[in-house]
Image (cartoon, rainbow, N blue to C red):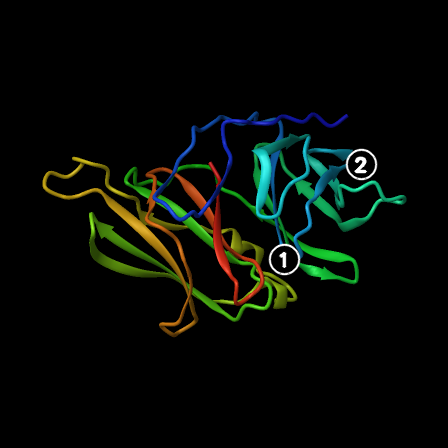
Amino acid sequence: MIRKIFFYAMGCIFITTSCKKLDAPTTTPDKDLGYVSFTNANSSSKTLHILVDQKQVNTTAIAVNGTLLGIYAGFAPGTRALVTRDPGTATPPIDYYTGNLDIAAGKSYSFFQYGVLTAGAFKGILLNTDRTKDENPDNARIRFLNLSNGAPALDLLMVRSEGSVVKDSVLLYSAVPTLATVATPDLNLLSAYKSVPANKAANSTPGVAVSSYVLKLKLAGTNTQVSASAATTIVPGRNYTFYARGNYPSTALSSVIDN
């Protein structure tokens, strides 16, 4: 019997058009279980049910660009059968993806459903997810996935401002191809995070205004902007997965908090 544990203290965060603080409480996982988050980033506007070993994990259908409520579900270690299914009442049911989850005790993972419906199926990827904080308490950690269908290679830039004054721009990821065109994704590379200075809060440095980031997607190696976030707070100690979504050129940026 698989034990399932849901943490409701964490949730999926989307880039919005107003200043958004990306923050959430932390929880301590049971080391006897492995933990998986499920994010629905498909580009065909399909909601999903998630089934693990033939048992439905979610209580309500996961919307497009939505993540399992609470983010993590806990499972006994081992190889688990994963199915993503249309929430309709078709008989037999319509399944969009079948695969395995290889789960180790005390480890965390992130599953992303992506792509357009092709021959009745979507693509999916399972990443290793590090939920520990960066060694530098002033930093956060970020990783990036290009899940936008039809998108060319993209750059991810972080533009930092103090108050209304732009201070610097950092090219965090360069020429990231859409996974829709990658036959064998490099799971180790995609799972890794990069450490970045987090935002400074009010009065944290005398005389320095509150800082924020604008995250920008550009065509690789150019100044052609595809999408940009509003002013966004990157919280110290947080780990984020940012992902490009939708059908190019209507590509947008969303994120999930991983810890």
* Residue ID at (65%, 40%): 62
What is the number of the mark on residue 43? 1
Residue 65 is situated, as x and y percent measured from the top left of the image, at 57, 47
In the image, 176: left or right of 106?
left
Q: Is residue 82 above or below residue 56?
A: below
Residue 165 is situated, as x and y percent measured from the top left of the image, at 19, 54
* Residue ID at (44%, 71%): 219
Label 2 is placed on what type of residue?
Answer: Gln
Q: Residue furthest right?
A: 91
In the image, 184: left or right of 70?
right
Residue 55 is situated, as x and y percent measured from the top left of the image, at 77, 33
Between residues 195 and 175, which one lies in front from this camera angle? 175
The image quadrant that residue 58 belongs to is top right
Q: Residue furthest bottom?
A: 222
Between residues 17 and 237, which one lies in front from this camera angle? 17
* Residue ID at (56%, 27%): 7
> In what quadrant of the picture does the N terminus appear?
top right
* Residue ID at (68%, 33%): 60
Residue 57 is situated, as x and y percent measured from the top left of the image, at 70, 33
Label 1 is placed on what type of residue?
Answer: Ser
- Circle 1 — which element? loop
Q: Residues within 10 Å of mark 1 (few under 14, many from 20)?
A: many
Q: Residues within 10 Å of mark 2 (few under 14, many from 20)?
A: few
The image quadrant that residue 93 belongs to is top right
Q: Which residue is mark 2?
A: 54
What is the number of the mark on residue 119? none
Q: Earlier in the sequence, mark 2 or mark 1?
A: 1
In the image, 237: left or right of 27?
left
- Circle 2 — which element? loop
